[in-house]
Image (spheres, rainbow, N blue to C red):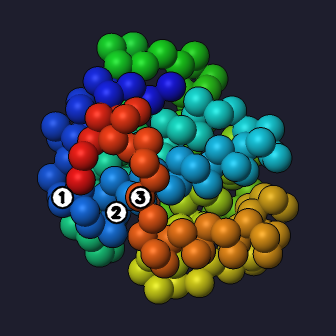
Amino acid sequence: MITPELMRAILDQYPLSLHGTHGISHWARVLENGQRLASITGANLMVVELFAVFHDSQRRNEHLDPGHGRRGAELAASLRSSYYELGDEDFALLYTACEHHTDGLINADITVQTCWDSDRLDLGRVWISPSPERMCTRAAKTEEIIEWANQRSTKNTLPDWVATEWGIRL
Ligand SMILES: [Fe+2]
Ligand SMILES: [Fe+2]
């Protein structure tokens, strides 16, 4: 469960615009992509949700930003136990998923694969069509899911629950 307190702690350290291409609406869609994929892949839902809010949280620019995945993973480490709880094994998955999310890898634990796919499904916002060959999981390669995610991404859809559940009004 992502609490408003966790979101505030993350955003206190987020240097970019919340409206940017790697900002809040991206995080929220990645979370919903991950929830949908996890219901099929059996990925750990808590890890998938935490990945959504940490993986781009330490970007310093909206372009190529080497190392932002590892910095996001380190932020996740620093807020663990104070703002959310996660066991050691699951935290290792979260760390790996954040650290390597831009490396183009395909093979990993199913939870890590689900995290990466949830991010790759949201490429439409920067006018890149998500490609089934770049996806890790069978679920994310399906036309139905790619189309669903891509439509939301190109429209920059912002889910209503961002205001009520994360306490963020854009
Ligand atoms: Fe990223
Ligand atoms: Fe991302």
CB atoms at circles 1 and 3 under 8 Å apart?
A: no
Residue 6 shows in the view: yes
Residue 68, percent from left and from top: 33, 55
Q: Is residue 152 above or below residue 128?
A: above
Residue 31, percent from left and from top: 53, 47
Name the amino acid type tagged 3: Leu
Q: Which mark is first along the chain, 1 or 2?
A: 1
Q: Residue at x 50, y 43 (%)?
A: 51
Q: Residue at x 15, y 52 (%)?
A: 15
Q: Which mark is first along the chain, 3 or 1?
A: 1
Name the amino acid type tagged 1: Leu
Residue occupied by mark 1? 16
Q: Is residue 61 above or below residue 99?
A: below
- Give how far apart the Cα atoms at labels 2 and 1 are: 9 Å
Residue occupied by mark 3? 158
Q: Is mark 2 within 8 Å of ligand 2?
A: yes
Q: Is residue 119 above or below residue 46?
A: below
Residue occupied by mark 2? 22
